[in-house]
Image (cartoon, grey):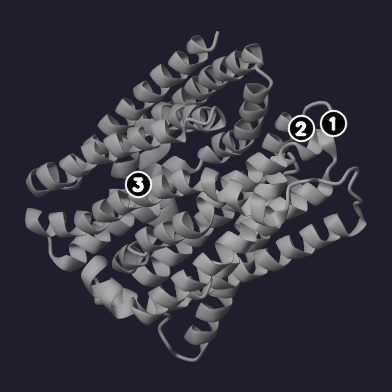
C-alpha cells in the first residue's frame, strides 16, 4: 500500500497520529484549565505570538524548502543529495535558533511588558526560549521525511512529544501539590520544553539510523554550500511572509485582551475570556484539522512533483478531490459542533462560555479546511507570494474587527471577524488556484 499510494498512506499515518495527539491534548487542556484557571490559560496563551514568530524565523520556511528539495529522492535514490539538503537546512536554521534563544531569554522582561503587555509572561518566555533550537531541529528532520513521503517518524515524534509534555506536567504538578504548593503556569511551559527535547532525540536517532545503512546511487554534483543558497532563496520569501503574518497575528493576539478592557472588562476578566477562546474553544474547532493538515503536508510535494512534470491532469484531480472532501468534511463538522458544542464546552472545560464560542465558530469549519488545502496547493505551485498577500488581507480584516467591534460588541465582534476573514481568504485561494491551473492549460 505504501509503495502504490504514499500520499494516502502518509496522510493516514499523520491523521491517526494527529487525532491521537489532539485527543491527549484535550484531556491535557482540561487539566490545565482546572489547574491554572481561565486567567492562567489566558496568560499561557499570550505566549503563542512569540512561539509563532520564533518558529517562522528559525524553521517554517526552511522546513518547506527541505521537503521540496528532498522529494526527488524517491525516484533518484540519491541519498547523499538528501543528506546535503538536510545539512544545508541546519546550517541556516541553527544559528537563527541560537540567536533567537539568546534574544528572548535576555530580553524576556521587555518582551513581556512592551510586546505582550503582561509582565507575568517573563519567566514563561525564558523557559520557552530554551526549547527553540530543539523545535527547529526536529522540524527540519520532519521536513525531510515529509519530502520522501515517509510519515512514520514525524507521526511517532508527534505522539511521543505530546506524551512526554503531558506526562512531565502531570508529574511536576502532582509533586508540587503533594508538598503543599500551588502549581504555576510556568509548569506548562516546562512541559512544552521537555516535549521538544524528547521529540528531537527521537528525530535525530531516526535520521542517523536511516543514513547509516543507505548508500548513494550516484554522486550528486551539488555541494552543501550551493544547497544552502538554494534553500535560502526558496525559504526567504516564505519566511518573510510568515514573519509578517505572525507580526499581524501577534498584534491581534495582544490587542484582544486590551480591547476587551476598553469594552468594560477588568484585566482578569479579559484574560479569562481570551484564555477560554484561544485555549478551549478554538482548539476544539481545530481538532478535525488533524486530518486536513495531514493531507496538506503531502499535497505540497505531490503538487510540486506534478507541476515540475507538467502533469496538469494530476493537479486538477488533486484540486477537485481536495475541494469536495474539505467541503463535505467541513459541513459535517459544522453540524456536529452545532449539535454538541455547548455540551462539549461544559463537559471538557467546565465552561459555558467555551460552549457559546464553539457554537458561533462552528460555521467556520468548511471555510477553514478548504483554505488550508488550497493554500498548500498554491505553495506546491510555487505561489507562496500569493498566499502571503491573501493571509495579510484576511488578517487586516480581522484587525479591523478587533479594534472597531470588540470595544463596542465585546468578544462576539472578534468571532464575526474570524468568520468574515476566513470566507474572504477561501474565496481568494479558490480563484487563484483556478487562475494558475487554467493559465498553464
Disc 3 and disc 1 in contact, CB within 8 angstroms: no
Q: Position of residue 386 (x, y in %)?
A: 40, 31
- Element at label 2: helix
At label 3, counting other C-alpha atoms closer than 10 Å, the crowd grade (few under 14, some 14-19, many 20 or more) is: many
For mark 2, what is the residue? 6
Instruction: Give the Cα separation between the discs numbered 2 and 1.
Output: 6 Å
Disc 2 and disc 1 in contact, CB within 8 angstroms: yes
Q: Position of residue 10 (x, y in %)?
A: 72, 37
Displayed quadrant of residue 112: bottom left
At horizontal 59% and vertical 51% (from top left) the residue drawn is: 229
Instruction: Give the Cα separation between the discs numbered 3 and 1.
Output: 37 Å
Q: Position of residue 266 (x, y in %)?
A: 13, 65
Displayed quadrant of residue 307: top right
Which mark is first along the chain, 1 or 3?
Answer: 1
Residue 165 visible in this rendered orientation of the protein: no
Residue 194 visible in this rendered orientation of the protein: yes
Displayed quadrant of residue 196: bottom right
- Element at label 1: loop
At label 1, counting other C-alpha atoms closer than 10 Å, the crowd grade (few under 14, some 14-19, many 20 or more) is: few
For mark 3, what is the residue? 245
On screen, 309 above or below 417? above
Q: Nearer the viewer, residue 353 or 52?
A: 52
At horizontal 51% and vertical 54% (from top left) the residue drawn is: 26
- Element at label 3: helix
Which of label 2 and label 3 is nearer to you?
Answer: 3
Instruction: Give the Cα separation between the discs numbered 2 and 3.
Output: 32 Å
Which mark is first along the chain, 3 or 2?
Answer: 2
On screen, 319 above or below 160? above
Find residue 3 and name its label: 1
At horizontal 16% and vertical 59% (from top left) the residue drawn is: 258
Q: Position of residue 421 (x, y in %)?
A: 28, 33
At horizontal 21% and vertical 54% (from top left) the residue drawn is: 256
Amino acid at each position: 500500500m505504501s509503495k502504490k499510494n504514499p500520499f494516502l498512506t502518509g496522510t493516514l499515518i499523520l491523521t491517526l497520529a494527529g487525532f491521537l495527539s489532539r485527543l491527549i491534548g484535550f484531556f491535557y487542556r482540561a487539566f490545565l484549565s482546572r489547574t491554572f484557571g481561565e486567567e492562567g490559560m489566558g496568560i499561557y496563551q499570550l505566549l503563542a505570538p512569540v512561539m509563532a514568530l520564533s518558529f517562522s524565523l528559525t524553521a517554517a520556511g526552511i522546513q518547506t524548502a527541505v521537503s521540496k528539495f528532498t522529494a526527488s529522492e524517491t525516484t533518484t535514490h540519491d541519498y547523499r543529495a538528501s543528506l546535503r539538503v538536510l545539512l544545508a537546512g541546519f546550517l541556516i536554521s541553527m544559528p537563527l535558533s541560537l540567536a533567537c534563544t539568546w534574544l528572548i531569554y535576555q530580553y524576556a522582561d521587555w518582551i513581556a511588558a512592551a510586546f505582550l503587555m503582561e509582565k507575568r509572561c517573563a519567566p514563561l518566555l525564558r523557559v520557552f526560549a530554551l526549547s527553540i533550537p530543539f523545535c527547529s531541529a526536529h522540524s527540519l528532520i520532519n521536513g525531510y521525511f515529509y519530502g520522501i513521503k515517509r510519515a512514520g517518524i514525524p507521526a511517532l515524534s508527534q505522539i511521543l512529544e505530546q506524551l512526554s509534555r503531558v506526562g512531565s506536567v502531570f508529574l511536576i504538578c502532582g509533586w508540587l501539590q503533594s508538598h503543599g504548593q500551588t502549581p504555576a503556569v510556568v509548569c506548562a511551559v516546562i512541559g512544552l520544553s521537555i516535549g521538544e527535547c524528547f521529540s528531537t532525540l527521537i528525530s535525530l536517532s531516526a535520521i542517523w539510523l536511516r543514513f547509516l545503512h543507505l548508500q548513494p546511487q550516484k554522486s550528486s554534483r551539488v555541494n552543501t554550500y550551493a544547497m544552502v543558497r538554494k534553500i535560502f532563496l526558496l525559504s526567504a520569501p516564505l519566511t518573510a511572509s510568515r514573519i509578517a503574518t505572525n507580526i499581524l497575528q501577534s498584534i491581534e493576539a495582544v490587542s484582544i485582551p486590551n480591547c476587551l478592557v476598553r469594552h468594560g472588562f477588568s484585566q482578569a476578566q479579559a484574560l479569562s475570556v481570551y484564555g477560554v477562546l484561544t485555549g478551549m474553544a478554538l482548539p476544539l474547532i481545530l481538532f478535525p484539522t488533524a486530518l486536513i493538515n495531514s493531507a496538506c503536508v503531502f499535497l505540497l510535494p505531490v503538487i510540486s512533483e506534478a507541476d515540475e512534470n507538467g502533469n496538469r491532469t494530476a493537479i486538477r484531480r488533486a484540486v477537485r478531490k481536495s475541494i469536495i472532501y474539505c467541503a463535505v468534511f467541513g459541513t459535517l463538522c459544522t453540524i456536529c459542533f452545532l449539535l454538541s458544542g455547548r455540551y462539549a464546552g461544559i463537559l471538557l472545560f467546565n465552561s459555558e462560555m467555551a460552549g457559546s464560542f464553539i457554537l458561533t465558530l462552528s460555521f467556520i469549519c468548511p471555510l477553514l479546511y478548504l483554505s488550508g488545502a488550497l493554500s498548500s496547493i498554491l505553495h506546491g505551485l510555487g505561489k507562496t507570494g500569493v498566499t502571503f498577500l491573501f493571509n495579510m488581507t484576511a488578517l487586516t480584516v480581522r484587525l479591523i474587527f478587533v479594534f472597531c467591534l470588540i470595544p463596542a460588541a465585546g468578544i462576539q465582534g472578534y468571532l464575526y471577524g474570524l468568520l468574515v476573514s476566513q470566507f474572504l481568504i477561501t474565496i481568494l485561494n479558490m480563484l487563484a488556484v483556478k487562475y494558475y491551473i487554467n493559465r498553464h492549460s
